[in-house]
Image: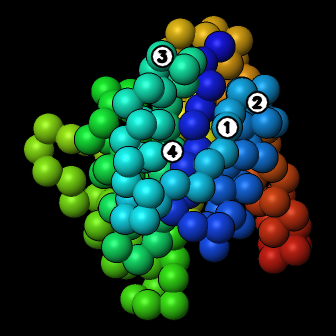
Amino acid sequence: MKKVGIIMGSDSDLPIVRKAAETLRAFGVPYEVHILSAHRTPAEVAEFAGAAGQNGFGVLIAAAGMAAHLAGAVAAHTVLPVIGIPCQSNSFSGLDALLSTVQMPSGIPVATVAINGGVNAALLAIQILALGEAELAQKLMQKRLEDAERIREKNDAVQAEFHQ
């Protein structure tokens, strides 16, 4: 199975990245986590992204806040799918990061999840990998069924409380 590469621009993004890593781990998907900055270590970003396919990665996730150029910088150096996680900062509540991540020029796509959307970034990476991994697709389907059952149970509890 291909690995997922998770790159964060700063260790301040670690709480969001941890959620992505925990989700990947729960599905048995191998991953690596790195701190690489689009602005402070651009050569390392280019090197990592450029060699990612040869190094066994199938999807890359890039988490960054504020200017949030990391996902775009990664996508510029690879043809692998790149998923951007805009991270909330004290400035603009993460809207700046969201706009920086989602406003990519034509030809360099970055899939973008919600602000602080580490879990969804991991799930999207898993969906991409599941295209070639039937067992992974089955695990995703099982998760959806379990999620639906939890909602039904919560609905039953609310119905019991309010419709006696």
Which numbered disc, 4 or 1, marks the residue that appears first in the sequence?
Answer: 1
Q: Nearer the viewer, residue 84 or 113?
A: 84
User: Which amino acid lies under the numbered mark 1 shown in the image of this protein?
Assistant: Glu
Q: Pinpoint residue 33: horizontal percent, then vertical percent.
A: 66, 45
Quick check: 162 above or below 98?
below
The reply, left or right, for residue 120 in relation to residue 25 is: left
Residue that label 3 marks: 54
Q: Secondary structure at mark 2?
A: loop
Residue that label 1 marks: 32
Q: Pinpoint residue 131: horizontal percent, then vertical percent.
A: 50, 15
User: Which amino acid lies under the numbered mark 4 shown in the image of this protein?
Assistant: Ile
The quadrant of the image that shows the C terminus is bottom right
Rounded to the nearest angstrom, the CA distance separating label 2 from label 3 is 23 Å
Rounded to the nearest angstrom, the CA distance separating label 4 from label 1 is 10 Å
Quick check: 34 above or below 14?
above
Please state which of the two labelled residues, at mark 1 or mark 2, is closer to the viewer.
Answer: 1
Rounded to the nearest angstrom, the CA distance separating label 1 from label 3 is 14 Å
Tell me where residue 39 sits by quadrant.
bottom left
Please state which of the two labelled residues, at mark 3 or mark 4, is closer to the viewer.
Answer: 3
Residue that label 4 marks: 61
Rounded to the nearest angstrom, the CA distance separating label 4 from label 2 is 16 Å
Please state which of the two labelled residues, at mark 2 or mark 3, is closer to the viewer.
Answer: 3
Q: Secondary structure at mark 4?
A: strand
Which numbered disc, 1 or 2, marks the residue that appears first in the sequence?
Answer: 2
Residue that label 2 marks: 27
- Quick one: label 1, few (<14), some, or many (20+) residues within 10 Å? few
The reply, left or right, for residue 93 in relation to residue 21 is: left
